[in-house]
Image (cartoon, rainbow, N blue to C red):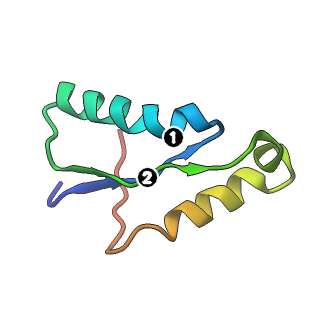
Amino acid sequence: MSGPVTIASIVEGDGEVSALPVLLRRIAGALSRWDVRISPPRRVPRSGLVARGGVENAVLRASYQLTGVGEESCC
């Protein structure tokens, strides 16, 4: 993989907004990946996620935060 990896995330609660980036940085460090960019998590209340198409809509909106060329990877 070339270049930095950017992670967009979706969380449900207020506490997760501050906790998830810390967790993701720890995981990246444990994997010796120092080229990871973590965008601020997008908070979506549970009611928005469980609604029909809610997760898909949240993922689409989170993807709008990202710029550049996407990259597919497997395993």
Most extreme residue toward the bottom, as rendered? 68
First reached walking from the N terminus: tag 1 or tag 2:
1
Amino acid type of the residue tagged 1 in the rendering: Val
Q: Which residue is mark 2?
A: 40
Task: Estimate the x, y position of residue 41 in percent, counting from the top left.
Answer: 49, 49
Give me the residue at 60% from left, 57% from top. Answer: 59
Give me the residue at 16% from left, 49% from top. Answer: 35
Task: Estimate the x, y position of residue 32 in percent, counting from the top left.
Answer: 13, 32
Task: Estimate the x, y position of residue 47 in percent, counting from the top left.
Answer: 83, 44
Task: Estimate the x, y position of residue 38 in percent, counting from the top left.
Answer: 34, 50
Left or right position of 26 against 51: left
Residue 17: which numbered mark, if any? 1
Give me the residue at 41% from left, 67% from top. Answer: 66
Q: Secondary structure at mark 1?
A: helix
Labels 1 and 2 touching (C-beta < 8 A): yes
Which one is nearer the viewer's eye here, 72 or 21? 21
Distance CA(mark 1)–CA(mark 2) = 7 Å
Amino acid type of the residue tagged 2 in the rendering: Pro
Give me the residue at 26% from left, 28% from top. Answer: 26
Q: Eyeballing the image, is 69 above or below 53? A: below
Left or right position of 7 against 63: left
Left or right position of 9 against 52: left
Which one is nearer the viewer's eye here, 7 or 23? 23
